[in-house]
Amino acid sequence: MEQARKGTNPLVVVFDVLGTLVDHAGSLAHRVSVVAGIESEAAANVVRQWIDHVSAQERAIIDGRRAFAPSHELDAEALNWLVGEGLLPPDALAGLTDASEWLQPWPDTVDGLDLLAADVMVLGLSNASRRVLAGLSGRSGLRWHQVLSGEDAGTYKPDPGIYKLAMASVPAGSGPPFKVAAHAWDLRAAAAAGMRTAYVPRPDGDPPGPDDTFDLHAADLRDLHAQLLTLEG
Amino acid sequence: MEQARKGTNPLVVVFDVLGTLVDHAGSLAHRVSVVAGIESEAAANVVRQWIDHVSAQERAIIDGRRAFAPSHELDAEALNWLVGEGLLPPDALAGLTDASEWLQPWPDTVDGLDLLAADVMVLGLSNASRRVLAGLSGRSGLRWHQVLSGEDAGTYKPDPGIYKLAMASVPAGSGPPFKVAAHAWDLRAAAAAGMRTAYVPRPDGDPPGPDDTFDLHAADLRDLHAQLLTLEG
């Protein structure tokens, strides 16, 4: 790493994973369609309710209304709820419990992380549990200098605690890390914790509003890499 | 990843870091020599006492005699103790506080991890704190599918809790992971927790005794990769 050899402070980039680096909803919908034998629009609707159910539980944890549970347990609860609602057949459960470990990366993700890792420190920060992060990273080829889970903070984004954990986990002497995400709500919380921000558009993302002032807007990871190198110069 | 595409269970390899992938004592001794302006044998002796001091504190934490503190805080305590003992000049402190983030990888480490990551899931499990793991991984080019710290378990190796954390963090459906280390004491504790074991010899390691029966003995990471591929076949 050139900057490390020069002894200057390293540039640190902290990636959101679900939705930003992997196709969260699309990958789950494809799997639901295959496993439950339903057509893709119905599968997408089931997945929307699955993700909403998990998000509601994450919100309950952030608000202190329930104890922390890792994301794979929330997935299991959501699937059982979907079966109870009659939206999934009971025999689909076994084929879906580990679906979050098989999410597909966006086309630029793996090469983009490789490119970035040659020049900056690449961290992950995700609501996915440790086991889910290990599974999807290993299967998709996402490789990290460090990767942190909501499990490490005992809470979920956008709770300030998870961003504080990331700030405490960057190397000594590094400047404020960049948070990279496809969700404006994630970047707003990261900025409030003192991180710099980079927005990357993705399908199903949360685009910036008129009042958002993020530090960088990148078309994709290759563009992000080019913009970060300009900053370093 | 071929095996993932085939849908079989992934092979998971969990690496010790300090001493196994990076030259812990040698890198610190070099830095002490440069920063404190003392010759290399004296620097090696200072580092032996530094590492022993940290190990004693880790043992106190494992035994419940003190609360958990991350490795960079134990490093800072050890350095202050060394100054108090007259073994280091006070003005060396500033140049040594982040020394653990600059440990040098062994010659086969970076290429070996790249080679392994193409075929198996590569995890790290270290007594180094999250910030130290981020710093040394980013600066040396160690890249992980998942990396866990003693900080995640609130204890240190060889406490069973840290191996239990690793076992709970492997992907669903994977078999028992391989623990890879240059220290027999680490592999014994890993085996007790249900992990498979692979010994790799390194300078300053802890070689197996006559009663040790580890699953694999590899000359280096390239050899480890070859042996693991044979198992998968």
Image (cartoon, coloured by chain):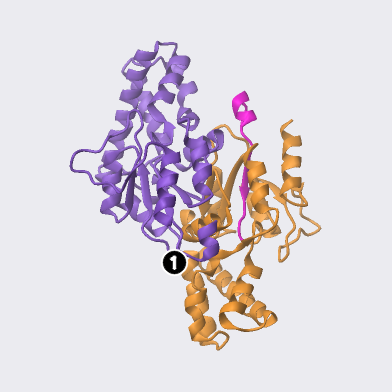
Chain colours: A orange, B purple
Of residue A73 and residue B109, the one placed in the foreground of this image is: B109
Relative to B88, is A163 on the left or the right? right
Q: Residue at x 50, y 42 (%)?
A: B113
The residue segment tinted magenta is A1-18
Kindly identify the amino acid type of the residue bearing the numbered disc 1. Answer: Ala
Relative to B3, is B17 on the left or the right? left
Q: Which residue is mark 1?
A: A67
Residue A30 covered by magenta stretch: no
Relative to A171, is B57 on the left or the right? left
Most distant residue in the right direction: A210
Image x and y of residue A30, in percent: 63, 73
Of residue A137 and residue B207, the one placed in the foreground of this image is: B207
Image x and y of residue B163, in percent: 34, 51
Relative to A76, is A8 on the left or the right? right
Q: Residue at x 75, y 60 (%)?
A: A207
Q: Residues within 10 Å of mark 1 (few under 14, many from 20)?
A: few
Q: Secondary structure at mark 1?
A: loop
Image x and y of residue B160, in percent: 29, 51
Q: Is residue A76 above or below residue A179?
A: below
Image x and y of residue A228, in percent: 72, 39
